[in-house]
Amino acid sequence: MSEFIATADLHDGDVLLYHGKNFISKLVRLFDGGDYSHAGIFAGGRVLEAVGSGVEYQELAKSVAGATYVDVYRYKSEDNAVLGSPQLPGDPVLENIHHYEEHRERYGYEQLLLLAILAATRRPPFGLAPGLAMIMRNLLESAADIITSITDGGREPMICSELVFRCYDEAGEDYKILVVGADILSRFAGGPLTSRGLGDGLLPGEDTEEAVSFQAEARTFLAEYESAKGSQIAALDTRSMFELSRANPNYVTPRDLQKSPSLRKMGTLRL
């Protein structure tokens, strides 16, 4: 792996992961536990990504302009075939990229939405300190307003990393991006792994009135998001939120892409 990769060496289907500069980007990385706050997919010299205006297919230079750095990841199958090789033609993925570009008016996104999903499905890395739960509740309320605005406009919310994931996931069995943990969580219902989710009660020190209230609002927010996505997830109160978030394409995050065994880091894009 080279330290840098030139734009001329990008391949169609390459996954771009962005280390953003703004405050929300920093919070996304904090809650997600990864190095990135945004994701896009490269094809035909441009980048398909979910941005503030929705799903866009824009020039590479414009796409990366606001990032501190952008790392390039390349898909490989379970038998180590690279996308675009004779063993793994790239057309199915490219067809999905073009599909989402052609139907971009159906989708809406703001980065605050990704942050709210992370806040609702993962325990805060610094605990629910006094006053923090209230801030997070305000975050969920703002994100709920974003969902309403998107759905009132006749669109469906779609976060950036979900868009990248779906371009591969919907291409067929040979193009699945594996998400670490998603294949084993269902075996641990009620076990140690599910203790990371909101569905399993509070940890010591999290039994304050603010924390309990945040839990309730997180559940409400996720139910609203599932409704906006047209999803049917039953029994939110009996399953781990961590399990739901990791096993569902609606909740794939930049860190999930970074840690996926299906994506090989090629280097940092030379901006």
Image: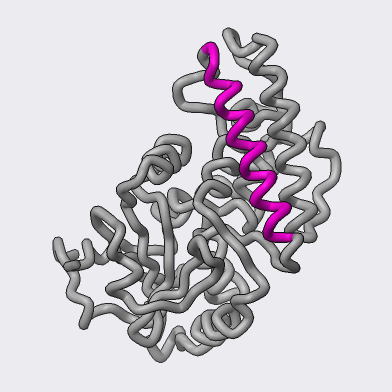
Q: Is residue 238 left or right of residue 214?
A: right
Q: Nearer the viewer, residue 40 or 137?
A: 137
In percent of the image, x 32 and y 75: which residue is there?
60
The quadrant of the picture occupied by the C terminus is: bottom left
Q: What color scheme is it?
A: one colour
Q: Is 6 placed above or below 246 here?
A: below
Residue 64 painted magenta: no
**Percent position (x, y) of residue 226?**
75, 51
Q: Is 91 placed above or below 235 here?
A: below
In percent of the image, x 22 and y 63: which residue is there?
267
The quadrant of the picture occupied by the N terminus is: bottom left
Q: Is 162 placed above or below 217 here?
A: below
**Percent position (x, y) of residue 5?**
19, 70
In percent of the image, x 42 and y 38: which residue is there?
27
- Magenta extent: 130-151
**Percent position (x, y) of residue 124?**
51, 27
Q: Is residue 150 left or right of residue 125?
A: right
Overall secondary structure of the magenta section: helix
Q: Is residue 123 left or right of residue 202?
A: left
